[in-house]
Amino acid sequence: MFLGLVMVLLGYFVGSVPFSYIFPALKGVDVRKVGSGNVGGTNAIRASGSAIGALSMLADILKVFVIVIVARALGLNGFWVYSVGISAVIGHDYPIYLKFVGGKGVASTLGFVFAIAPLMGVEFLGIWLLITFTTQYVSLSSMIGFVVLILTAVVLKWWDFSFVLAFLTLIIIYRHLSNIRRLLSGKENKMDLVKALKELFSGDVK
């Protein structure tokens, strides 16, 4: 139990590391003052280009992935592993290093999913890419992607994981309330994923 509590606490502090703030800041950009003001990968792309944004997203995924893998490697049972993952995602959303103002939990939750169920992580990416390509709404594709993962877990009768996914998805939806209002009013920001990918692979960074 002591080890579990230590890892949950460590998970929060690791999850709190705001890579989507740090990497743009290295180029002199404060993502909190650009675009949506969100400390997340999508806003990092808008603020400092595809390369920095992609690096931010990857780091936000990996920080949760790694801490959950470590928890499993230490022999913690399912309850504690899930708790470490949840704590890390909450750290990302409410980071102590940025006065508890963080991202919306999409990349960090995806890192948790990849650590527990890699194929479901791939499933999410497929859904996310499809919806983002067709609608250009990152927020919509993110929320739908996690809802589908919940349904997948239910179909598989993976009840404990489905409950954890439902909890994390509710947090994501809550963090996206402003996006939902903009979606309903037709004012949500769009992201041209094709353009962003071309910029990323061409090396054309801001």
Image (tube, grey):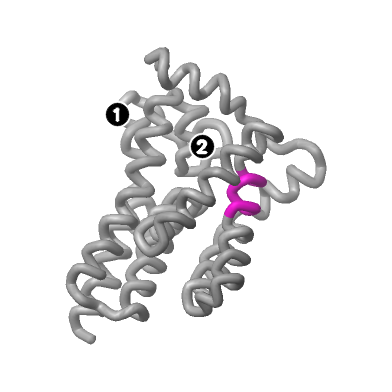
As drawn, which residue projects farthest toward the right? 185
Q: Taking 115 as reference, is 134 left or right?
A: right
Q: Taking 124 as reference, is 188 left or right?
A: right
Determine the residue positioned at 65% across, 53% down: 144
| Numbered marks: total | 2
Determine the residue positioned at 66% across, 46% down: 140
Mark 1 neighbour density, 10 Å: few (under 14) some (14–19) many (20 or more): few
Q: Specify the quadrant that holds the N terminus.
A: bottom left
Looking at the image, tell me whether mark 1 or mark 2 is earlier in sequence order.
Answer: 1
- Measure the C-alpha gap from mark 1 to mark 2: 17 Å
Tell me, yes or no, if residue 170 can be seen here. no
Residue 167's x, y, as percent? 54, 70
Q: Secondary structure at mark 2?
A: helix
Determine the residue positioned at 51% across, 37% down: 42
As drawn, which residue projects farthest toward the bottom? 1
Residue 173's x, y, as percent? 62, 58
Which mark identifies residue 88?
none
Q: Taking 70 as reference, is 20 left or right?
A: right
Tell me, yes or no, if residue 2 can be seen here. yes
- The span picked out in magenta is 139-145
Q: Specify the quadrant that holds the C terminus.
A: top left
Q: Secondary structure at mark 1?
A: loop
Image: 74 above or below 194: below
- At label 1, which amino acid type do we have? Leu
Closer mark to the observer between disc 1 and disc 2: 2
- On whether residue 56 falls in the magenta region, the answer is no
- At label 2, which amino acid type do we have? Thr
Which mark identifies residue 42?
2
Q: Label 1, on which residue?
A: 26
Mark 2 neighbour density, 10 Å: few (under 14) some (14–19) many (20 or more): many
- On whether residue 142 falls in the magenta region, the answer is yes
